[in-house]
Image (spheres, rainbow, N blue to C red):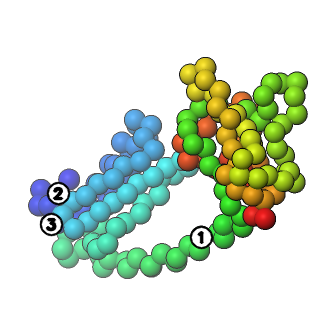
Amino acid sequence: MSENPSEPLDVRTIHHLVRLMKRYDLTAIDFTGGTTKIRLRRQGAQLPSAHFGAPVAPLSAAPSSAPAVPQAPAAPVAAPAAPAGIVIESPMVGTYYSSGSPDVPAFVSVGSAVRPDSTVCIIEAMKVFTDIPAGVSGTITEVLVKNGQAVEYGQALFRVNPA
């Protein structure tokens, strides 16, 4: 590796980092050297990809070696449009249950009308079962979790089309 922190990384250094990733089964390496930032990521058996932060320095260590190939700017990725409706989120960490017991129908399903005080599910945490109210008026358009699934605080449980 380069002794001077402001000197750009050479191709051998990048190859060395890739070999380390393979040898130790790493999925990510972030490396900063002076003004050069390198982020290597790989998934499973695929080859690692290199993402360079700004500013991007040439990869050769020798000042008179072949000219650096300019990097094309990355095209901006448009975020997918969020589905319409209000999301009912989990107010706590626990296990989601769609009904009060296995032999009883779910509190709500797609198409069910709810009011703010309607129970939409139960979340169990540490053997305490808590009824979760809708908090809104409308129609359930999507159930985003499965019965018995562990949920996190703030995780989307239902999508509701407001009335």
Residue 50 in the image, given as x and y percentages of width and height: 42, 60
Say which amino acid is labelled 1.
Ala
Q: Earlier in the sequence, mark 1 or mark 2?
A: 2
Q: Residue under label 1, please give it.
A: 79
Residue 115 in the image, given as x and y percentages of width and height: 76, 53
Say which amino acid is labelled 3.
Ser
- Real-space CA distance between mark 1 and mark 2, rounded to the nearest whole angstrom: 39 Å
Q: Residue under label 3, please give it.
A: 6
Seen at 52% across and 77% down, the residue is 75
Residue 102 visible in the current orientation: yes
Q: In the depicted view, which residue is nearer to us: 77 or 131?
A: 131
Q: Residue under label 2, please give it.
A: 2
- As helix, strand or loop, the secondary structure at mark 2 comes to loop
Height in image: 151 above or below 157? above
Residue 32 in the image, given as x and y percentages of width and height: 25, 58
Task: Give the side of residue 92 with respect to residue 30, left or right.
Answer: right
Height in image: 162 above or below 96? below
- As helix, strand or loop, the secondary structure at mark 1 comes to loop
Judged from this view, the residue extending furthest toward the left is: 4
